[in-house]
Amino acid sequence: MTESEAADGYARAESWAASWGDDGEAAPRPNLTLLQPSRPPAHDGARRALNVVVASVLLLIAAPVALVIAILVRLTSRGPILYRQTRVGLDQRHTGMRRDDPRRRQDLGGLPFTMYKFRTMGVDAEKGSGPVWAAKDDPRVTPIGRLLRQYRLDELPQLWNVLAGDMNLVGPRPERPAIVARLRREIPQYQQRHRTLPGITGRAQVNLEYDASLADVRLKVQHDLEYIRCASTWEDARIMVRTIPVILFRRGSR
């Protein structure tokens, strides 16, 4: 992503974030959260290598399943097979203030990237509501989409995000810019989640149910910060293993 594309992404995010004002007026842009300069730990390279290797293997194994899913999505509902959505990723601000840095003028908290999923909702599902959390028995979800969500199969395309360097298999779940803008104002230390690559699964996902309220997010942030504090190759491997029963027993899916 070029600097101009990043600037455009932040500008769009700012307009989205305005819709979260409680009184119907434009919400103020959150202040820049001041953080200590990030210094990647020595074990980050090993963690990244583990995530890439496992993602590559899973991508090869899941290729036939992904092909079947793509055909079913195409045949059962109108619209594209893949759903693309802007999410907030790693906060890469390791250096001081720069005048030409668009992230300083339009601060989103991290670098925006395009995350991929198999489409599970109808076309323009959020046209009337805007960015909202998924609800139980969400009427916007298609029949095949409901099945994909139960077993988290809609997340398979994110393996490409892992290989592209936007995500790891393990890390805090990335959120949409408008939602991040709101949560940064309401949850202390929320910004700290962006000090590591986001993930497909994470400590919060294997310990808690799907979040549907601000109180749920506050609890998940505690787990995310604890993960960042004790992150290691072993911790990532442990969370990967613990994710298997979460998928098989459909815990927390919506």
Image: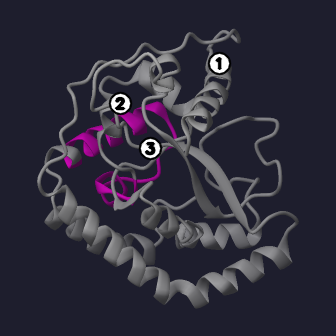
The residue under label 3 is 89
The label on residue 108 is none
Secondary structure under badge 3? Answer: loop
- Give the mark nearest the N terminus, 3 or 2: 3
Secondary structure under badge 2? Answer: helix
The residue under label 1 is 18
Q: Is residue 231 magenta?
A: no
Asked if residue 188 lies left or right of residue 136, the reply is left
Name above or below for residue 213 compared with residue 104: below
- Is the stretch drawn in magenta largely helix, strand or loop? helix
Name above or below for residue 126 compared with residue 170: above
Q: Of circles 3 and 1, which is in front?
A: 3
| In contact (CB < 8 Å): disc 3 and disc 1 | no
Residue type at mark 3 is Gly
Give the image location of residue 244, x and y in percent: 36, 76
**Number of numbered discs:** 3
Q: Quadrant of the C terminus?
A: bottom right
Q: Is residue 211 magenta?
A: yes
Asked if residue 221 lies left or right of residue 77, the reply is left
Range of magenta residues = 199-227
Q: Is residue 134 visible?
A: no
Q: CA distance from mark 3 to mark 2?
A: 13 Å
Asked if residue 59 lies left or right of residue 228, the reply is right
Q: In the image, what residue occupies the spot 26% across and 71% down?
A: 50
The residue under label 2 is 190
Viewer-proximal residue among 94 and 75: 94
Label 2: how many Cα within 10 Å (few below 14, some 14–19, many 20+):
many
